[in-house]
Image (cartoon, helix red, strand yellow):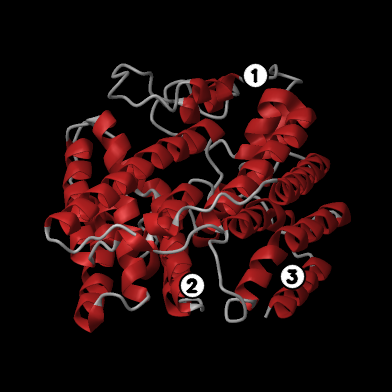
Amino acid sequence: MTIAFLTVLLAFALVNPYGRSQLNLTLGYVLFVLAGLPVAFWMLNLSVNPPTIPLFQITGAFYALTYALPGFGGLPERVRDLVTESQLAVALAASLASWCCLVLGYWVSIHLSRSWRMSRRNDEGIGVPTFIVVIAYGFTVAANLWAVNYEWLSLGQISQPLKLFFFIWIIYNAWSGRTGRVGKALILWGLIPLEFLLFSELENAKLFGLVNFALICCTTYAVTRRRLPIVFAIAALVLFAFLQPLKAHHRYLTWAGEAEWGKGEKLVLYARLANDFYLGNGGASALSFSEVVGESQLRLNHTYTLARVMTDVPAAHPYWGGETYAPLLTKWIPRTVWPDKPREDLGNRWAQALGYLGPEDQKTSYNLPWVVEMYLNFGWIGVGVISLIVGSMIGLIDRRLIQAASGPAAFASALVISSAFFIPESNISMLLGGAIISFVVILAARFGLRFGWDLVRFSSGKWAAP
């Protein structure tokens, strides 16, 4: 299948319907192969070797889809004149350099670090029944809903990673046969859809939640069942492709004015827009179908964003000199300790500073992908050095958490932390800071569960010292 896809991509490059330069096609193809092969090999070896969380592989797939593939496609007419073929080629070269440096950092980290194995007693030895985990999940769901409804950010920092931790633990048990047939059915057809509807933020047209949810579920299924959930993965891809063209118009309608939209009303609006656009007269947008598809592709085209930034910085705007990384110094501090800690607004601020958003637009968050952020701060040196650092961090997580995971709790811990790196299209401080907080919160939760369950067993006379 991998060879067939690469052959089709090569044929598309030879036909070249968008008239891209040969240099762009070559750079795009090379980057796609180098970044996409790791995830292809991981999928091919699922039934051969015990699978682990494919953090490095998913990162490569992200590079292949958002940096390499745009080298083959076109741009919407409204932005076609903002960047030239040569500028896009420079951006593709920077993306390729970033991936190569990331791979180097990952390789060095993997080979130099020693495995820090979590104690198996800390995981399998907990022995917590699934119904206890489900109860804990219910409490964290309630806490997270409370935090969202009342904008209690400090509570959300704790409840969100804990909720995801317990959710992964539960579905791991279900797919690994630890819950019985009835329990498995309730989890698969009840809990998983509930988690998606409540916390994917689909009603806010944030398709990041859909993609992240799909990656978490597919990874857990692949590791426990040693095969990919093909139907689930295809359904997620179709839903993403179905909703992406409607996202901008949905946000415009729900963000405009002072009216408050409920979760159900927003979902109904999405359904109505889909009906108008796909079955009606294009009522969901003033654009034609091809134009909407082009705008949707532009949202995933990080090569275009990188090309614009490399054109404007430092020619029209100075390098930021690490300003976007400053929140890393305070991101790890919980809001329970620092209630007035400033909220990150970089997604809007950086785009306004470079003129990509109008001064009156205070709501739109313009994603700042990692490679773009690296260049924005330090130029080519930043692309190389920071990619090395990111690669080494991914290697450390792979070596010390992923490869050491030996059961549901350890697996859930590793997946929650890894998922922060799955879609690197937001600034590093936001994703890495969340991973640090998640690690501390989950570590405390696992210790509390182990201590509490041992106390229960000791009280009931079922515990004996080794």
Q: Give the quadrant of residue 275.
A: bottom left
Give the percent coordinates (x, y) of residue 23.
87, 53
Give the percent coordinates (x, y) of residue 90.
81, 40
Q: Identify residue for label 1.
A: 320
In the visual, does 220 lie left or right of 109?
left
Question: Who is closer to the viewer here, 426 or 181?
Answer: 181
x 44%, y 73%: residue: 224
Secondary structure state at the residue bearing disc 2: helix
Q: Earlier in the sequence, mark 3 or mark 2?
A: 3
Q: Identify residue for label 2.
A: 222
Q: Identify residue for label 3.
A: 9
Question: Who is closer to the viewer here, 274 or 66?
Answer: 66
Q: Point out the frontmost of discs 1 and 2.
A: 2
The quadrant of the image that shows the N terminus is: bottom right
x 54%, y 28%: residue: 351
Give the amino acid at mark 3. Answer: Leu
Give the percent coordinates (x, y) of residue 85.
80, 45
**Is any atom of residue 432 visible in this view?**
yes
Q: Residues within 10 Å of mark 2 (few under 14, many from 20)?
A: many
User: Considering only vertical position in the picture, is 217 above or below 451?
Assistant: below
Give the percent coordinates (x, y) of residue 384.
77, 36
Q: Give the quadrant of residue 427.
A: top right
Q: Give the quadrant of residue 174.
A: bottom left
Give the amino acid at mark 2. Answer: Ala
**Is any atom of residue 305 visible in this view?**
no
CA distance for labels 1 and 3: 37 Å
Q: Residues within 10 Å of mark 1 (few under 14, many from 20)?
A: some
Secondary structure state at the residue bearing disc 1: loop
Secondary structure state at the residue bearing disc 3: helix
Q: Residues within 10 Å of mark 3 (few under 14, many from 20)?
A: some
